[in-house]
Each structure stands twice: as C-alpha cells, then as structure tokens.
Image: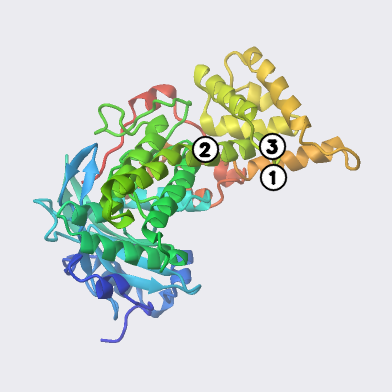
Amino acid sequence: MANPAPFRFDNSFARDLPGFYVPWNPVTAPQPRLLFLNHPLAEELGFDVGALDERERAELFAGNRLPEGAQPIAQAYAGHQFGGFSPQLGDGRALLLGEVVDRLGRRRDLAFKGSGRTPFSRGGDGKAAVGPMLREVVVGEAMHALGVPTTRALAVAATGEPVHRERTLPGAVLTRVAASHLRVGSFEYFAARGETGRVRQLADYAIARHDPQLAGADERYLGLLKAVAERQARLVAQWMNLGFIHGVMNTDNMTISGETIDYGPCAFVEAYDPEAVFSSIDHHGRYAFANQPRIARWNLARLAETLLPLFDADQQRAVERATEVIDGFPAMFEQAWRRGQAAKLGMDPAGVVTDADGALADDWLALLQSQRVDFTLGWRRLADAAAGDEAALLSLFARPEELQPWLARWRERLARDDPGGGGSAVQAQAARAQAMRTVSPFLIPRNHRVEEVLAAASEAGDLAPLESLLDALRHPFAEGPRQRAWADPAAPELTAAYRTFCGT
C-alpha cells in the first residue's frame, strides 16, 4: 500500500531503547469519522492533508491504517499518583506511533490516545470518549496560543463504538504531538526495579533529545536534573500567571521536555482563589492552584532519586548534590513567577524585580481574592488602567475604594521605569498598556463554555460551537467580537459546583 500520510518517521525511541516498550497495534474502529484535524499543525509536520480523502483521513487517525514508517509501541513507565507509588502504569490506552521530523527539523512524537487495550491496561478498556479527547484539543490549542509549552492535538476521530464510564459515551481516538513522552515516571519504572543501567540509558537518550549540549559532559546527569527543574519552574510559573490548574500533577504527567501533558481534570480559576480545586478525585487539595510549585518540587525529588547512582558513586555525596538542585527549585520558580507578574504589572522587562515589587504583586492578588474578582479580567483591565482608563477595572470590585491605595502604589512604581525627556506621557501609557495586553489575555477557555461545546459535540454531534470557540481561542490576546462571545465568567454558583474528571 502506498504511504497514506507522508510523515518523515525516524523512530529513535523504538530503535535505541529495546526493552523500554512493548510493540503493539491499535484496535480497529468499526465506523471511523474524523471530528477534528489541526491543519496548521499538520503543515508543521509535513503532512499533506490533500493527499488523502475524507475516508482515508478517518481511517488513518482512528488507527485502522498506519502510515508507512510508523512503529507503534506502548511505553513502560511508573508513577506516583496522589503521592502513592504505582510501579507499573505504562501506556494503558495510548500508543507511540513514532517520531516525525517536522519541517523545521524538530523531532516530535506522534501518539494515539484511546486506541485500545495494551499489556499495560490493568483491566481498563484502553478506549477514550469524544468529550475528553476534544477537551485535549480545546485546552491544548488555547495553551499553545497563550505561549505555554504544551502537547497538541493533531486529530480526533470518532470510532463509531461506545465506551462505558459513569454512562455510555461515544468513543474517539486522539492523535497527540509532543516533544517527547518521556516522563518522571519513565525513570521511576526502571529505578524501582534496580535497573541502573537502563536508567542510565534513558538519561542518555533524554539528554541527546532534549539537552544535547550536555552530551559527554562529566556531570551530564546532574545537568539533566537541573535542566528539567528549570523547565518545570518556568512552566508552572506560566500556568499560574494564567490561572491554570493542571489537576493531576502525578509524576507520570510531568514531562522531561517541560511541556504540559494530559488535559484531564484541568481548569482555570475564575474568581481568584489560591486554594481552588476542581478535580473530582482530588479530595484533599493536593493539586490545588497554589500547591502546584510545591508538587513540582516533590515530583523533581522523585526524579532525582532515580538518578542518584549516576550523580556520584558515593551515595551521601550523590544525595547532597541532588538536594542542592531540589532545594534550589523554589528560587527558580520564584524568579519565573515574579518575572511573569512584573510583565503583567507593566514593569520594565529589563529591570530588576525587587522584594517590594513582589509585595505589590502579592497585595494585588490579595485584593482579587478578598473581593472575588475574576483573575483573567482583573489582569486585563489593569492594562486599561495603565492606559488611563480605570472605569472597567473598578467595576470588577465590589468595594472599589479599597483598590485605590494599591493603585497609587502601583502608579508610583511604574513612574520609576518611565524615562525622562522625549515622548509624551500619553504615548508611554499606551505603549505600556499594549505590552501588558500581550501577556494578560482577554480570553481563556472558560470552564463552562468548554463544557458547553464538548456536550454539543458528544451528545448532539454538533461541532460548530467547538470550531467557533477554537477560532476565538487561537487569538486570546485580541478583544474582538469573536473573543467577546466566549469571554464572560460563569455565575459564581456554577463555578462553585464545577468539577472535572479524568475521562478514564
């Protein structure tokens, strides 16, 4: 059969790491139908959409026919889930089809999710439902447009068969693109078995793929831990400066690449609350909004434990060296978090972020929290205030008079960044406000609106609302009619009762 999808496969994981996976094929979908195809991403990957007709595309992305060069495998990994260790998880409903070298020469994983049982399924059906797979589309594309490192959906195909969860739902397969699917749990799997040689193999592979500048260095494994920590610090800071809650920060969901992966029980805060939890299974708030940096550090400590034998033959010295990196994570996060806040506050991006600046940001968040102000709109309307129009910002506060002392402090701080001499004050204000609008979006995937479009697609087969929302989310910093149609927060009582689910 001729190659149905001209991807440039080069499957280094399957080639270089035998014993780290099980070769496996997707199950056949009885009635495949393409629900979503990401045309811009397909173009990046070198996939010629026009080379296949509609039926062929549906067959391809449902797993009924594999492109030439694909080598489907189920990867092995373990994971700490809500703090408890599971020594064997693995791809229970996913398959890595292979790696595609895209038009820019980047190596990217192409993987199915929901393509049937594998040897790692542990009694599960290996299937996925339309709603959760389209959630991956919506949130992943929104995060990409917001500038957050993320896995992305290339396609979603309905399978034409039901899956059974709390109720019967239509089945689907997601095709996911990632820098890689290496996770903290990938290292835990082999470390838990005492297979230090394989941990070393995996670390060398991760370095070659994500940190090639470390290859051959004397302290490359410690360098890998530092690089992963730095990526995760930046990532979690970006999440939090957008009000994002991952919802299931298990070690099998922390990537070595620093990309966001798994949009199951994720959500965005509306009225600002650092203790916000939306996941139906997070009963004790382990993964609450404000806990995310602490959990990232905890996960990194688990990664460090797997790499200890590679740091130093002397265990005590190895522990000391790992501890230095893990104990340095809060400062890494704090720097990324404060830098992001400084940009959102309109400060000079080249300037020094002081303790006083941090206090200014903290006091702003305290005001948002005490008056239940919408996180996204609060930051966005602060940009309007920077341009000289405070009305929209003040309207968000039940007691706007309490905001005025903070605004005075903020304006005084901004004045220290303003250069003297040429240029009008009005021009400087407009430039600052515009810069703030490039880091504080007008539109996020509002939880209730995401649920609306997923319900329309899953229950009524209506994809038009999904397409409309995606069209708006791809331009989240614009404030036009497309964005306004989706921008309003939910009613407080709706948000209070909102819960998200894993979809498994």
Residue 257 visible in the current orientation = no
Q: Quadrant of the N terminus?
A: bottom left
Q: CA distance from mark 1 to mark 2?
A: 19 Å
Q: Going 35% across and 30% down the picture, which residue do you hit?
A: 277
- Looking at the picture, does residue 124 appear above or below residue 8? above
Q: Going 49% across and 38% down the picture, which residue do you hit?
A: 331
| Residue 350 image label | 1
Dot 1: element: loop
* 166 relative position to 222: left or right: left
- Looking at the picture, does residue 52 appear above or below residue 363? below
- Of marks 3 and 2, which one's residue comes earlier in the chain? 2
Residue 498 image offset from top left, x and y in percent: 34, 30
Q: Residues within 10 Å of mark 3 (few under 14, many from 20)?
A: many
Q: In this view, which residue lies farthest toward the bottom?
A: 2
| Residue 241 image label | 2
Query: Which of 350/327 is in front?
Result: 327
Query: Colour mode?
Result: rainbow
Q: Amino acid at mark 2?
A: Asn
Q: Amino acid at mark 1?
A: Ala
